[in-house]
Image (cartoon, rainbow, N blue to C red):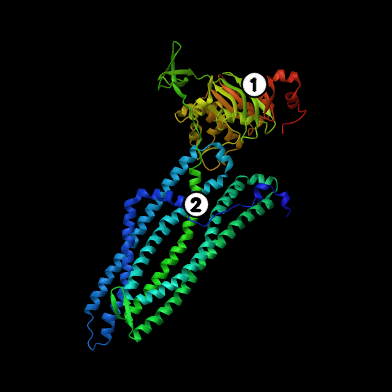
Amino acid sequence: MNKKNISPDITKEPGHNPKNKLDMKTAKRLISYLSQYRLRLIAVIICILISSLAGVASILFIRTLIDNFIDPLLNSAVPDYSDLIKVLIAMGLIYLAGIVATWMYNRFMVIIAQGTLKKIRDEMFAKMQLLPISYFDRHTHGDIMSHYTNDTDTLRQMIAQSLAQIISSVFSLIAVFFSMLYLSVWLTLIVIVSIYFIMQLIKFITRKSGRYFMQMQQSLGELNGYIEEMTAGQKVVKIFCREEQTMEAFEKKNDYWRTSAQNANGYANTMMPMVNALGYMQYVIIAVAGGYLAISQAVNLTVTGTNTMTLGMIASFLTLSRNFTNPIAQISNQFNSIITALAGASRIFELMDEEPETDDGYVTLVRADIKDGVINETQKRTGTWAWKHPHGDGTTTYTKLEGNVVLDDVDFGYVPDKLVLHNISLYAHSGQKIAFVGATGAGKTTITNLINRFYDIADGKIRYDAININKIRKSDLRRSLGVVLQDVNLFTGTVMENIRYGNPEATDEQCIAASKLANAHNFIKMLPEGYNTVLKGDSGGLSQGQRQLISIARAAVADPPVMILDEATSSIDTRTEELVARGMDKLMEGRTVFVIAHRLSTVKNSDVIMVLDHGEIIERGDHQSLIERKGTYYRLYTGAFELE
């Protein structure tokens, strides 16, 4: 297939330059989350120590069992098993202690892992609520979701399994090493030499696999992002017959992930078999050397002195040597798991370290009661709101919320060196309806995004009731604005809960009144449970127009002084639009309204219509004056040319 026919965004080669080294900064930060479980971690270490000592004691018992009991009993004419039974019972208790300790530390580690992940997810979600809209413009939803699923799951595996395994292996290594020295220094030297060669092999494998494990984790996030994007846009894919190109792009990303996972796990999975093979060679060498020392009655050097090698000592040492090799392989094997987990943690911390949406505003929105022209703050629902201005001298003044919006020579660009709005000036007085028309990309929605302060302007001023909006706290600013977007988002819950989302304090009666205002009441009453009908997922049971009507009711129940309608009726048929228009006219009474519409019939009754082109206002006036001017608006309205 011809590559040039495929859009660049779906064929982009995943770009990674991961390192297979431990990110100590990320590791230290992750450890800080574990510090809240200090007591449990201490208990884990104690339990691991008991488990390791129980394991070593059981191995050393082999020597005692063979040399002190089995061998004498075999040479005894009348064997007495009473002492043997007592020793076996004692060893059974040691084994039981090891089993209980192992169960306890694994149980504790699961509690620690889940508690730590809960805290990380809570902080991550809380931080996500503070991020600016621009962050979500730059990152796919699937990649963000991957932080909560794949990345946190790698942390769970590391904390619950790898961390405990490494601590246990380290303790076992120490205990086994000194136990080997206790049995034979000569045989221990053989183990050390063989371990050197095993470590060289492990180093080679981990260096190869570590890089691919990081690639695997990062490419999985990209793959999830692409799947989410294609799932959401499946209708568009089918409409434009892009199935083949989409599948090709998916196969490319999926193949990249497969290759990374294949290489990572391929190297990692060869580690244990190869280490075991070298371990068996070591096993044979020790057996031969130990047998030679025993047969020749050579002096056996130990940390406690010298003795003669026995059959029991050889059997115990052979088992110890295997238990010395395996922990080393396990630590190295867990090294890849740690690298993968730290790669996931690094991605999580990148999100948590993103710059939050800044807010230097200090003017707040409060309920007000006006008597004799004096504005007083109150907790009662008066239907009147005011801006509260704290001053440096300790005094406070109030300005009634009217809904006057002024843009004065505003410039803006999503990137600093490329402006999309140029010298935008407009004056929207309380109760006026301002309409923006123009081609796609002309800057209509951008203007409303600036009023919301989703983005900050590059130059100029935006004033709300004569207050610079930079001085107004963003949450209070947005609470005073009602927004109806073209893309409707309804949440899982009842219809009533979705309408009340616009005003949590609204009563059922107020929500129903808002629905009637938006002409949504009739179809809602026809739903199976009326206002108590539960909407799930993407509310697939409702038409796009019905979803839009609910969103309009949601904005209406907020009862804001300023309304922003961004293609609010684009998903509604013409007949329904006429009904909604009457409700919208009631909704707009006494409010400042900004309307963005491609259907010019919906903006005819606007007080001011502004025609935008390439980020500039090229015409302004009411419908009649613009028609008489016979400029761009006239040509748009008469169909001389269509909006792009």
Residue lying farthest to the bottom in this orientation: 77
| Residue type for callout 1 | Ser
Give residue 606's mark.
1
Secondary structure of the residue carrying numbered label 1: loop
| Residue type for callout 2 | Gly
Asked whether, in this view, residue 3 is left or right of residue 404, the answer is: right
- In this rendering, which labeled residue sits more in front, label 2 or label 1? 2
Q: Please provide percent x and percent y for residue 623.
A: 69, 20
Please indicate, yes or no, whether residue 16 appears anywhere in the rendered image.
yes
Residue under the image location 42 percent in, 70 percent down: 325
Residue under the image location 22 percent in, 83 percent down: 80
In the picture, which quadrant includes the C terminus?
A: top right
Q: Nearer the viewer, residue 553 or 185?
A: 185
Asked whether, in this view, residue 77 is left or right of residue 558, the answer is: left
Asked whether, in this view, residue 583 is left or right of residue 309, the answer is: right
Disc 2 crowd rating (10 Å Cα; few below 14, some 14-19, many 20+) is many
Secondary structure of the residue carrying numbered label 2: helix
In the picture, which quadrant includes the N terminus?
A: bottom right
Q: CA distance from mark 2 to mark 1?
A: 52 Å
Q: Is residue 562 above or below residue 117?
A: above
Q: Nearer the viewer, residue 59 or 524?
A: 59
Location of mark 2 (residue):
344
Disc 1 crowd rating (10 Å Cα; few below 14, some 14-19, many 20+) is some
Q: Please provide percent x and percent y for residue 355.
A: 51, 39
Quadrant of residue 440 within the rendered picture: top right
Please indicate, yes or no, whether residue 567 appears anywhere in the rendered image.
no
Q: Please provide percent x and percent y for residue 137.
A: 58, 40
